Image (cartoon, helix red, strand yellow):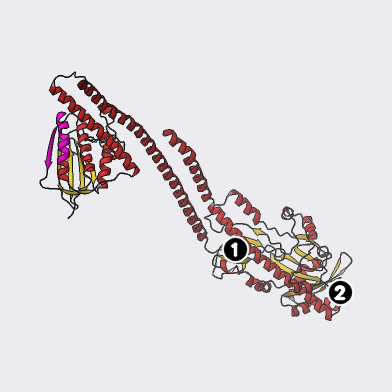
Amino acid sequence: MRKLALLFELAVLAPSLVLAWLAIRSVRDQQFLLERQQSLLYQGVTDTIAKTISDRLAQQQQEFSAMVESLAATNSPRTLALQFDDQVRKAWPLAEVGFSVALSGTSTCTLTCPSPTAGPAAQRFLLDNGGFLGNSETAEVYLNVNNSKVGIQKNALNGDNGWNGYNNSQVQQLAQKNESPQAQASSEPTGQNYFKGKTRSVNPQSGNYQTTANQAADSQDNNLSKVIPAEAEFRELIGDGTDGMLARFLQNKLKLMFWHRLNRDSNFVFGAQLNLPRLVSGLRDLAQPDPALREEICVAILDDNARPVAISRAEFHTVWKRPFVATEIGEALPHWEVAAYIVDPSRLTQAVCTETIILGLVIAVLVIAIGVGGWLIVTDLNRQVALARQKTDFVSNVSHELKTPLTSIRMFSELLSENRVADPAKQRAYLQIITAETARLTRLINNVLDFSRMERGEKKYNLRDADLINIVRETVDTYRPHLENCGFKLECALAPGQLPIRADTDAIAQIIVNLLSNAEKYSNGEKKIVIEARRRDGPLPCAEVRILDRGPGVPKGCEERIFEKFYRAHDSLSSGIQGSGLGLTLARQIARAHGGDVVYEPRESGGSCFCLRLPLKMD
Ligand code: ADP
């Protein structure tokens, strides 16, 4: 049995405990997983908004190119080159300063506009960009160059952003020529699209999250901008491109320029420095997440100093430098980002907590279920094994019980039949022994047969009106001679009158005989038995027969088990008392079939008291 329990533990309990342990470990990773899921979801939002902003800028760049072409349609290139600053500011509200560059050869550029007399903005522009646009000095710029010959209007109408087909290899070459470590670190292909938004991964807003070493390394890497400046002269930068944009940082301020090479005369390049606040106010409506996420996150457009220039929730404040996720907009607005912030970071922790608790509970319930199931199986196996052992004991007990009376019957009947006993008193005594042993044999066989009928559900009772006092009296009269022969004193206390019951009289007599026989067997030399029959009053009045002896009584803890089939509290080997373990089982089953019961009560000053209770017949 112990082997079986050990096997069970190894085969079921150990693997389920290992599984539970693995499940608990995975519960611990829930926080990271949930954070990851959220970050992927929000990353999608910032990526989309960053792309929309890029597309909007691309569209504005096309509008600028179209506007330059329309201005050139009414003016000669040379005239336009001189008046472009004025004209572009009138025609295009986003323009802060317009400029025109006349190209000749591969390295000569002449800045023809704006004029230094045009005003302070033009003067500042010339101071900042004169050398660079005149191709006399290099500058560090972020650029996108389009060399597509496809008509701008067509692209614009198609909704195509018109920036496809940028000369990215040129940008790459320029970036590689620039020997800044940032540029060297980012020599990965930038793809063919204008939108080169780079994502910044999870950068938890709340200090509650524990980031793993990998995550930390990751976020460090991702915090580096992937948008690279290129250092070159203007002529070299624009190459053969038809239009494009340039962004520069001057005195830590971003300056964004659009330029367009005239279709009619490719030696003329017209451009404009953009009014950044106006441009940004046009982008404000784009800083909005999906309506479903509006309550969860706040989206902000951050400038190169990580200051919000547009936010989706006016009342929201946080450490802007620590977004949950962010996407760089690209070369159009270098180091600008679309960032997402969790409105209530504790909600994520709470969600993780709830999920962890639920999973933990499920695991605990499953482990308990496995444990309880296992325990039930082992208990049942134990019971089955015990029952099998009891059955084996039963067979040997019954064989013994059959053998003992048979031996006596055979011995005394041989003595009598061979006339070897002359004394008539002795002859009578031997005949009485034979009768008693035959009765014992009959009782045993009846018990076994009745038990097997009951087990098969075939036991039938012949119920009729009867008087319990009468049944007890008749049974006692039959059994008394045997008891008195064995030296017992049987005291019978019967209540006057009748105890009407509805019962199978033979079955009730069988119960009384079994109880009397037990009182005799387990008397331990105290040869006094009392039998009482009376009405028992109480909430449920009933008829009661009590059989009392002064034997050893039922050992403690076995009071209920003695009614189980084959169970023997006094085992034959140690007590020397023969038995089958069926007498009380049968007694109780018969009593219960009559709506009553048989119970054991310890007797004061030692001994047993077995009570048979049966319902009184109501008139
Ligand atoms: P058995 O054939 O063993 O007597 P029973 O079902 O009649 O089977 O009784 C079950 C067990 O109950 C007995 O083995 C004995 O240990 C205990 N028992 C029954 N009657 C008495 C009694 N009068 N006094 C003490 N123990 C008893």
As drawn, the label of residue 264 is: 2
Q: Which residues are magenta?
A: 473-495
Query: Is 394 rendered above or below residue 130?
Result: above
Residue with the most extreme bottom position: 74
Is 187 placed left or right of 459 in the picture?
Answer: right
Query: Is 276 rendered above or below residue 32?
Result: below
Residue 531 percent location from the top left of the image: 15, 39
Is 19 placed left or right of 254 in the picture?
Answer: left
Residue type marked 2? Arg
Q: Residues within 10 Å of mark 1 (few under 14, many from 20)?
A: many
**Ligand 1 quarter of the rendering:** top left
Residue underneath mark 1: 340
Residue at left 15%, top 19%?
422
Magenta residue check for 483: yes
Cα–Cα span, label 2 and label 1: 45 Å
Residue type marked 1? Ala
Q: Quadrant of the C terminus?
A: bottom left
Residue 567 percent location from the top left of the image: 30, 36
